Amino acid sequence: MNEAAKAPRLRLGVNIDHVATIRNARGGAHPDPVRAAQIVAAVGGDGITAHLREDRRHIRDADIERIMAATNLPLNLEMAATEEMLEIALRHKPHAACIVPERREERTTEGGLDAAGQHNHLAPIVTRLTDANIRVSLFIEPDARQIEAAIRLRAPIVEFHTGKYAHAEGAEREVELRRIADAAALAAKNGIEPHAGHGLTFDNVQPIAAIPQFAELNIGHYLIGEAIFIGLEESVRKMRALMDLAR
């Protein structure tokens, strides 16, 4: 039996931001991200991820409490490292808070957080979240320098940005896969739980899922996009099955 086959079950966190994006395009209440969270819970998802952005283009403030009340799944709140977002997280106390970089002009998160360069800014935020019993995750590139920063910050979780892997092809993708695998091993060796996400699809998820140190994948845009064609239930079930096969 290979090492991947011995790995524990890999959790699937489903990002429901883009259900809210569609809702916000016309205003009103439909489609409701809360209904999406309930579907994810019903078909085997392990968690809900939502990014409360500064401009509220996806999830809105009022959605957070509703999502948390709708299912027993843990909420992973993606947030920028700002005082506003910190206060919101401390008020709602989600299961986890994933600190991500955020620029107003970007369409989506375009890379990992510079945890090394922002240590002094991040340290009190990580401490306050931890003191509130919120699991802190840092969304970083699969890079040793950033992992070392996470260790210094005492972050229990890192989520590796897999965008470069997802967009690469051929030999370049294999290089990126090895970089991610090495980073996952380094994080786990130092007592940090590694997660991964960004750009993962039915076609590219299995090599990432097979990395034995990973405990969780967070996937959103692709699953919501596929739901247009095959339904959210089937989209989540298919991703869950592919991840399980990889283990």
Image (tube, helix red, strand yellow):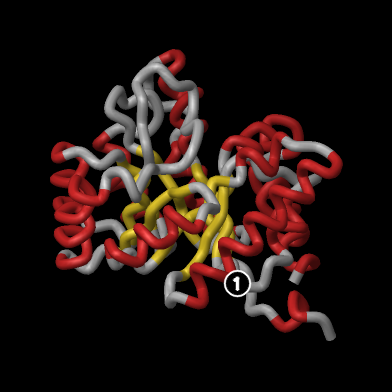
* Residue at 35% across, 21% down: 104
Is 243 rendered above or below residue 238? below
Q: Could you tell me residue 152's position as x and y percent?
A: 29, 64
The part of the image, by quadrant, that contains residue 208 is bottom right
**Whether residue 245 is situated above or below residue 161 in the rendered picture:** below
Amino acid type at mark 1:
Gln
Q: Is residue 157 left or right of residue 229?
A: left
Q: Residue at x 31, y 44 (%)?
A: 117
Q: Quadrant of the C terminus?
A: bottom right
Image location (x, y in percent) of residue 36: 51, 43
Position of residue 242 measured from the top left corner of the image (x, y, whole percent) = 77, 59
Q: Mark 1 highlights which residue? A: 213
Q: How many marks?
A: 1
Percent of width and height locating residue 64: 30, 44
Residue at 26%, 63% in the rendered image: 134
Residue 100 lies left or right of residue 85; in this view the side is right
In the shown orientation, is residue 185 left or right of residue 103? right
